[in-house]
Image (tube, rainbow, N blue to C red):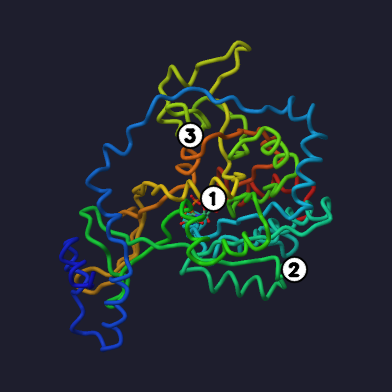
């Protein structure tokens, strides 16, 4: 479809507001960009209500710490064997904008160290290196970036000499982008000759691996399992042999690290079954009755929150990716130019971004093992500058866990 046809079909004529003022190469670039954008994400604005309807929610039993402790040696031996055989890869999801942290650099470049240079990316490489040392084998690390932070991320890693990790065990790839729009569904311009686009969420990571050739590296290396994880949890254990072994031994399509909730209504996504398939529901989607439902031991059954650390079987991912994931519509502050050409830097949300989420992939998997980990040892997210899940709280947890900062 040509740019003109797309504009008409999706009623986005405002994208050509400044076309007469552009140089020929600029208007050609704009045309090309419009041709490449998937405007169908905007359709989600019309069908919003139906999308939020959930199926029947029931409990999904987690493997808890006491059972993991009892079987630790068995799981660990199995996990180490898989890592040694090169069957396990790691995928760092670092394509997000990290807007809440408020730094213009990619989040992983944030200096979390106080008395020494220690960056978020460095913490993650150190954590992965612990397992490499234990297994005696390097683990291939894939790093997802976006058009907006690819350059800065790759340059930073190069400058820092990949924090000692061998460069040939690291593959960077880019995720897809989606247009942003105002509350009326009109797509924003970032510049007179540039449509405003934003990373399309973390759910498209495997599709992006396919599209960019990163999956060829997975195949060539014989990697059968991929451990995906968020950039912002500095205590993240990556390719943890016990977790890998438990998922393999229990014969599950996906393993999901979970933490015990602080309170029934803690604001985290919770593992459950939805219409009999593994799923994640948000705290506000659970009724009061479900929030307080207990098992025969008196323990709450929706008690384990996800921390964005999942182990996927590559074979199953190839099936999962055949289904298209829904787009979630998220209200955000979006910088753009208005119809008079003035730059707008909003201080409160002014429009929508469209994001696919990993949690929707979980629902497409046949089975999932929620695997409990100790929150204080493995969960120190850096989302905000101050307060909850902040630089400050993560620093405290790093120190508690003996990391020199
Ligand atoms: P968040 O949901 O915290 O989003 O991402 P974010 O964009 O980084 O931060 P805010 O909301 O703007 O402050 C959780 C994980 O998913 C990755 C992030 O990099 C982080 O590791 N992610 C998010 C992507 O890789 N791509 C995306 O499009 C969005």
The residue carrying mark 1 has its beta carbon less than 8 Å from ligand 1: yes
Looking at the rendered image, the quarter that the N terminus falls into is bottom left
**Callout 2 crowding tier (Cα within 10 Å): few <14, some 14–19, many ≥20:** few
Q: What is the quadrant of residue 193 in the picture?
A: bottom left
Name the residue beneath numbered marker 3.
Answer: 279
Where residue 145 is drawn, which disc sits there? none
Name the residue beneath numbered marker 2.
Answer: 166
Callout 2–callout 3 Cβ contact below 8 Å: no
Q: CA distance from mark 2 to mark 3?
A: 36 Å
Does residue 51 appear to the left or right of 390 in the view shown? Answer: left
Residue 127, horizontal then vertical, whole percent:
73, 53
Does residue 284 appear to the left or right of 247 in the view shown? Answer: left
Toward the bottom, the furthest residue is 24
Q: Nearer the viewer, mark 2 or mark 1?
A: 2
Q: CA distance from mark 3 to mark 1?
A: 24 Å
Point 47% across, 62% down: residue: 175
Q: Is residue 233 above or below residue 111?
A: above
Residue 395, horizontal then vertical, whole percent:
68, 50
Callout 2–callout 1 Cβ contact below 8 Å: no
């Amino acid at each position: 479809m040509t740019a003109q046809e797309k504009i008409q079909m999706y009623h986005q004529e405002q994208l050509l507001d400044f076309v007469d003022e552009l140089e020929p190469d600029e208007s050609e670039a704009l045309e090309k960009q419009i041709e490449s954008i998937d405007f169908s994400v905007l359709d989600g604005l019309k069908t919003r209500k139906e999308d939020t309807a959930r199926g029947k929610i029931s409990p999904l039993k987690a493997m808890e710490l006491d059972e993991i402790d009892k079987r630790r040696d068995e799981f660990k031996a199995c996990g180490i064997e898989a890592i040694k055989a090169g069957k396990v890869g790691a995928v760092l999801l670092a394509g997000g904008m990290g807007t809440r942290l408020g730094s213009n650099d990619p989040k992983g470049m944030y200096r979390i160290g106080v008395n020494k240079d220690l960056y978020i990316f460095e913490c993650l490489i150190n954590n992965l290196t612990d397992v490499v040392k234990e297994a005696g084998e390097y683990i291939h690390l894939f790093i997802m970036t976006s058009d907006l932070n690819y350059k800065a991320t790759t340059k930073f890693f190069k400058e820092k000499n990949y924090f000692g990790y061998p460069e040939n065990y690291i593959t960077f790839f880019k995720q897809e982008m989606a247009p942003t729009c105002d509350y009326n569904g009109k797509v924003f311009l970032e510049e007179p000759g540039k449509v405003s686009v934003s990373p399309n969420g973390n759910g498209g990571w495997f599709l992006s691996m396919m599209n960019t050739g990163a999956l060829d590296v997975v195949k060539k290396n014989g990697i059968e399992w991929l451990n995906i994880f968020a950039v912002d949890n500095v205590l993240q254990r990556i390719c943890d042999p016990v977790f890998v072994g438990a998922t393999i031994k229990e014969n599950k399509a996906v393993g999901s690290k979970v933490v015990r909730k602080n309170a029934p209504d803690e604001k985290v996504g919770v593992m459950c079954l939805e219409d009999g398939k593994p799923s994640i529901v948000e705290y506000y989607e659970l009724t009061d009755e479900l929030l307080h439902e207990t098992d025969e031991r008196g323990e709450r059954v929706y008690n384990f929150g996800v921390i964005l650390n999942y182990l996927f079987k590559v074979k199953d991912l190839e099936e999962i990716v055949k289904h298209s994931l829904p787009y979630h519509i998220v209200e955000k502050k979006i910088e753009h130019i208005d119809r008079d050409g003035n730059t707008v830097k909003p201080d409160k949300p002014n429009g929508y971004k469209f994001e696919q989420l990993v949690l929707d992939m979980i629902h497409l998997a046949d089975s999932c093992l929620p695997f409990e980990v100790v929150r204080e040892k493995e969960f120190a997210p850096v989302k905000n500058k101050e307060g909850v899940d902040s630089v400050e709280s993560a620093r405290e947890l790093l120190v508690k866990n003996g990391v020199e900062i």
